[in-house]
Amino acid sequence: MHTIVVQREAEIARPIDVVRRQFVDMEHHCTGKVHADLSVMNVRRGGDKCTFTGRRRVFGMLHEDEIEVTSHADGSSTLRSLSGTNAGLLVTQNFEALGPQSTRVTVKVEFPVKGFMRLLGPLVKLGLQRDAEVALREDKADLELRYLRTRE
């Protein structure tokens, strides 16, 4: 099996604690429709973890996954697809304070591919790069324009 790895980062004009909280607040992602191409539903909390169903269309085909979100003691968080179309997908989110009102978010996406999908690796990588950039832009807009007003 081969793993495609993509990493992107963005600076968000909000304090690190606010940014960390928003990135794992799947109830907010569900009700606030933070990501245009991703439906977040069936959010279930349990301890330091949360599981949700994520749905999106890729080339007209419905992708549905059960995703587990985990907050870690070091302040990072991970999203792991437990089952579904993209089972094995791992997204790691790291946060660095750049000042009292600024946070750098680094997102690393690891997507295992095998068989025919391995042949499409370069296209899959381009798609993952685009998805990571768009998702970060949407989270940034949510945090800088909407989220802060409703949470602080």
Image (tube, helix red, strand yellow):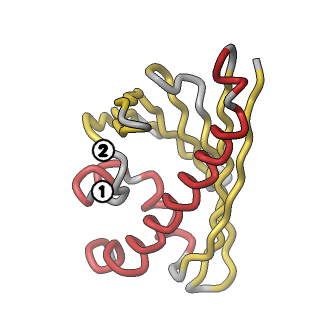
Residue at x 50%, y 23% (from the top left corner)? 82
- The answer to whether residue 29 is above or below residue 151 is above
**Quadrant holding the C terminus:** bottom left
Residue type pointed to by label 1: His
Near mark 1 (Cα within 10 A), the count class, few <14, some 14-19 or many ≥20, is some
Image coordinates for residue 30, horizontal then vertical, percent = 27, 50
Q: Residue furthest right?
A: 2
Residue at x 26%, y 39% (from the top left corner)? 41
Residue type pointed to by label 2: Ser
For residue 54, which quarter of the picture?
A: top left
Who is closer to the viewer here, 45 or 54? 54
- The answer to whether residue 68 is above or below residue 94 is above
Earlier-in-chain disc, 1 versus 2: 1
Q: CA distance from mark 1 to mark 2?
A: 12 Å
Who is closer to the viewer here, 16 or 119? 119
Disc number for residue 28: 1
Image coordinates for residue 6, horizontal then vertical, percent = 71, 48
Indicate the secondary structure of the residue bearing disc 1: helix
Residue at x 36%, y 50% (from the top left corner)? 37
Disc number for residue 152: none
| Nearest to viewer (mark 1 / mark 2) | 2
Image coordinates for residue 97, horizontal then vertical, percent = 66, 75
Q: Are marks 1 and 2 in contact (CB under 8 Å)?
A: no
Identify residue for label 2. 39
